[in-house]
Amino acid sequence: MAKTRTTWREKLEKEQEPKIVVASPNSKMAKRFGSGKMLIPRPLDVDALIRTVEKGKLVTQAQLRERLARDFKVDFTCPITTGIFVRIAAEAAEEDFTAGKQEITPYWRVIKTDGSLNQKFPGGAQAQAARLRDEGHHIQPAQGKKPPRVIDFQKSLQQL
């Protein structure tokens, strides 16, 4: 019997607890991310935060990590797992949309720190750009290896 593929929704809702890891000053982790208490959030924590972003507003992955760190009273949030969980939230939202749900996580409002779009989102940066244009944002096309980015994105950032 063939094993069925885990859906993105199942990945999003996987039973797990957030973890707080201490990165000692001389550890490999500290050299990469800094020392102190680091949060490894749950996918649902990331999804819930993305759901608070209003239509016409944007948020960076760095803002998501900063807010999660504040909420959990730690020094910082793991950028790798946060990025993975943003992707899981995006894919689960697209599964929901395909299934006919109207209220989905507005993952397209999450941009990179420099305002660039996320190629790993469903449909790539082009699909994200189309949704952002529908909400009134202006997109600078890709230039060479630089991905498309939101023009004057700082003006649309939502405070978390």
Image (cartoon, grey):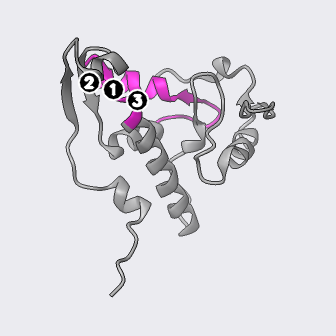
Q: Quadrant of residue 40?
A: top left
Q: Quadrant of the N terminus?
A: bottom left
Q: Nearer the viewer, residue 79 or 145?
A: 145
Give the label on residue 38, or none. Answer: 2
Q: Residue most toward the top?
A: 25
Residue 54, percent from left and from top: 56, 35
Label 3 with label 2: CB-CB less than 8 Å: no
Residue sitting at 38 percent across and 66 percent down? Answer: 6
Residue 34, percent from left and from top: 32, 15
- Residue 76 shows in the view: yes
Residue sitting at 71 percent across and 28 percent down? Answer: 150
Residue 144 shown left or right of residue 66 in the figure: right
Q: Amino acid at mark 1?
A: Thr
Label 3 with label 1: CB-CB less than 8 Å: yes
Q: Nearer the viewer, residue 15 or 52?
A: 15
Q: What is the crowding at mark 1: few (fewer than 14 residues within 10 Å), some, or many (at least 20)?
A: many
Quickly name the residue at label 3.
79
Residue 49 shown left or right of residue 143 in the figure: left
Q: Could you say whether the residue bearing mark 2 is in a helix, strand or loop?
A: strand
95 relative to 121, above or below: below
Quickly name the residue at label 1.
77
Residue sitting at 30 percent across and 36 percent down? Answer: 41
Q: Could you say whether the residue bearing mark 1 is in a helix, strand or loop?
A: strand
Give the Cα distance between marks 2 and 1.
5 Å
Residue 17, percent from left and from top: 20, 43
Give the label on residue 115, or none. Answer: none
